[in-house]
Structure formats: structure tokens, C-alpha cells
Image: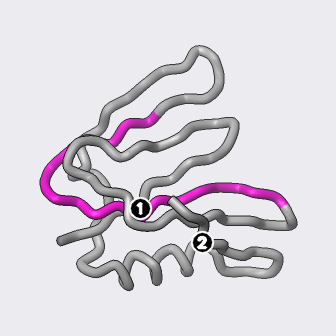
Amino acid sequence: MTYVLLTTKPGRFRTEPGEGMRPVETWQYHHAGRLRASYVIAELAGEGRIIIVDEEPPQVVNRLPSKFLPRYETLQAAREELAQLARGPGARLERVEL
């Protein structure tokens, strides 16, 4: 299996797993005391499409092929990439229940 990271920025857009994807873990990224983004690590069972929904009007929905996303061979590799994104003073990652 391979894994991908799906990003949601509250108030701006959300990314949802499409067909052939199974959410495995959800993480929230906080910086300076504010929630900045949420991430879903999803298991990719084949070539599917991710769904990106604009949260600001007009709510546009895009379906993009998963082939454009970086892939990680293990769940641990996806976690390590996520940890790289959340480095720096005032930044923290928090795992949340699916």
C-alpha cells in the first residue's frame, strides 16, 4: 500500500478522500495557538480522485487525480513528512480521532 496526505485549511478549503482511498489517521496543525490546517493520512488502494471543496462562496468542487499527490511507501514515512511540515517555534501537531 501507499499513503497520501490530504490537507484542509479551515475556512478556505477541505480535501476529502475519493474512491479507492481509506482514511487512516487525522492530525491537526496548530501554530501560535490557532488551528491552521488539518491533515488526513489516507491509504491509497489504486488510482482514485481526491475531492477539493472551496469553503468560501462560490463553493467550487474539484476532483483531481491522486497521481498528482506525493506518495509515501509506509504510514511512518507519511507521519515523518507531516512532522516536517509542522516544525518551528509555536507549532504543534495533535492527533485526533477519525
Q: Is residue 1 left or right of residue 59?
A: left
**Helix, strand or loop status at disc 2:** strand
Residue 22's quadrant in the figure?
bottom left
Which color scheme did the rendering employ for the protein? Answer: one colour
Q: Residue furthest top?
A: 58
Residue 97 x/y as whole percent:
56, 64
**Disc 1 and disc 2 in contact, CB within 8 angstroms:** no
Q: What distance separates the C-alpha of mark 1 from that of mark 2? A: 14 Å
Q: Residue furthest left?
A: 46
Residue 96 position (above or below residue 86): above
Please say whether residue 70 is visible from this viewpoint. no
As drawn, the label of residue 95 is: 2
Residue 82 x/y as whole percent:
51, 74
Q: Find out whether residue 48 is within the magenta segment.
A: yes
Residue 18's quadrant in the figure?
top left
**Helix, strand or loop status at disc 1:** strand
The secondary structure that dominates the magenta segment is strand
- For badge 1, the amino acid type reads Leu
Taking the spot 55% from the left edge, 29% from the top edge, the residue there is 54
Q: Is residue 59 left or right of residue 68?
A: right
Residue linked to disc 1: 5
Q: Is residue 56 left or right of residue 83?
A: right
